[in-house]
Image: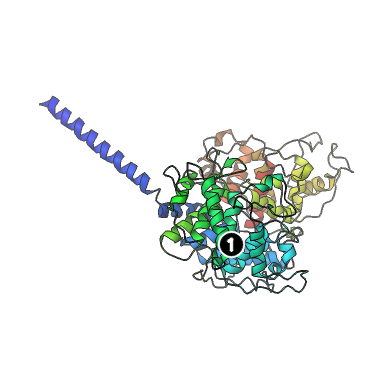
Amino acid sequence: MKKRLKQRTAVLLTLILSIGMSLQVQAAAADRTLPAVIQDTAEYVYTTVRDPQVGSIGGEWAVLGLARSGYDVPETYYQNYCATVEKYVKACGGELHDKKYTEYSRVIVALSSIGKDARDVAGYDLTTALGDYDKTIWQGLNGPIWALIALDSASYPMPQNPTAKTQATRQMYIDRILECQLPDGGWSLFGGTEAATSGDGVSDPDITGMALQALAKYQDQPAVAKATQEALTCMSKKQDETGGFSSWGTANSESVVQMIVALCELNISLNDPRFVKGGNTMLDNLMTFYLPGKGFLHTVNGSGSNQMATEQAFYGIVAAQRAAEGRSSLYRMSDALSISDAVTTETPAGQGLAGKDPSVTTRPIVSPGKTFPDIAFCNQITAIESLAARDIINGRAGGNFDPEGSMTRAEFAAIVVRALGLTPGANNNFSDVATDAWYAPYVGTAHSYGIINGIGDGRFNPGGTITRQEAAVMVSRAAKLCGLNPELDNAATRNMLAQFPDYMSTGEWARVPLAFCYKESILDQSELNIRPLEAVTRAEVAQMLFNLLSGAKLL
């Protein structure tokens, strides 16, 4: 009897476990549905891009995706973005870039998505630049493509630019795109232009997808309709058996996103037989890059989520969902949000906190749009570009930034002094800091304000590298000058650091500063480990200082 009871119990337990596992599998599958993925990615973008800036990552694309997704975002989020844009535009005197006119187009698209008129931003009309034909087309096909998308996003009238050598029209931009179409039917960045090289003769899915997005509203023109069908045929041939595309020989998520958005703008089903390969649609392919709770990968073999890939994939799946629900497309913004003007009593960004040291000042934007070729897929790109625009951080030899390179003590002294707007001045306190060394004034000032110390015996060791925990200590000292309180009691410090498996490997002297940096989001709590003894990278220092300046209202 007991044996039979045990057998029945075992069978029952097996059945329960089986049902439980089945439900878990079903739940996991349900979590992969498009609405669930959009919700999850929206949460990730919203929490990752807490303070959207003017930039190609951590800025306009995040705002666009959130605004068009229907995700519940506090109105203050968009209001703060508008305030950031206005401050940036004022600092630039209305000139976002002297050559890259997609800087204007990107901001126009984002503002339009939240119902703001890009013709009145801090007293400047951002659409005016797009009336200059020659300057708009300077950077290749990106220029006319995004000029059309931006101007059409809120049906802006064609701006008249009194300083333009050639006054642009919409038709001129359409014709420019058409005349650059390649023999295979697609487009590349410089293909068909005088700047073309041998590699530009092969169509690229990214540029082709964007060109189709720009031309989508002009299908009533026979030449446009013909070019569109040729491009679709070309891309159908280039689509691989996984449903995706490769750009420059590498299968990636961004390429398939641009084609997804293109089909949605053209009102073509993602299940169109021309774009189903091996039983896979483009959306199926895009989902292979998805990391639940962490965004999207750039390549399937990538080691972690990529911010650029995530933001583009986000607006791509939003475009797909809007198409599935019969709503207006991503860039047809008749149903844009309507964000009211901010009414706040908080300290405005750029003025600093009330308790800051009087010597700490805001660094103005002097190099708008400054970037580096080796940070395109760097998660800290927003921070790096923001600091570079203010000449706080510079590149290295060859024009690159070297984001994974280590940070020397001399470099850190220079960067932190510039970040706080302090006046450099040598104090001759260290025997190994020559008075004529480029970094001597920065080391002197950083030491005078208590941000950095020597290593003993009257030496500074300017060429030595800085560990992650040392960087946290120095940044916490800088935070005190900015008006923040870096002091935490033992319980708060322990509670903050105990979430990290390696926290006991931190130096006792660094624990309070580390806990403070995590508490104030200067360091990212979502990281698995503190890695206190690892050399901090240049990109990580940029992100820490960017987060500090943002929290201290100094950007």
- The residue under label 1 is which amino acid type? Ala
Outermost residue, left direction?
1
Q: Is residue 473 left or right of residue 32?
A: right
Tell me how the rendering is colored: rainbow
Percent coordinates x, y for residue 34 in the rendering: 42, 53
Q: Is residue 320 left or right of residue 10?
A: right
Q: Is residue 365 above or below residue 6?
A: below
Q: Is residue 99 left or right of residue 45?
A: right
Outermost residue, top direction?
3
Percent coordinates x, y for residue 495 in the rendering: 51, 44
- Foreground residue among 354 and 265: 265
- Specify whether residue 476 is in view: no
Residue at image position (55%, 70%) is: 115
Outermost residue, right direction?
436
* Mark 1 element type: helix
Percent coordinates x, y for residue 379 in the rendering: 61, 47
- Specify whether residue 39 is in view: yes
Crowding at label 1, few (<14), some or many (≥20) Cα neighbours within 10 Å? many
The quadrant the C terminus occupies is bottom right
Percent coordinates x, y for residue 274 in the rendering: 46, 50
- Foreground residue among 15 and 297: 297
The quadrant the N terminus occupies is top left
Q: Is residue 320 above or below residue 121?
A: above
Number of on-image labels: 1
Residue at image position (52%, 56%) is: 261
- In the picture of the structure, the residue carrying the numbered disc 1 is 214
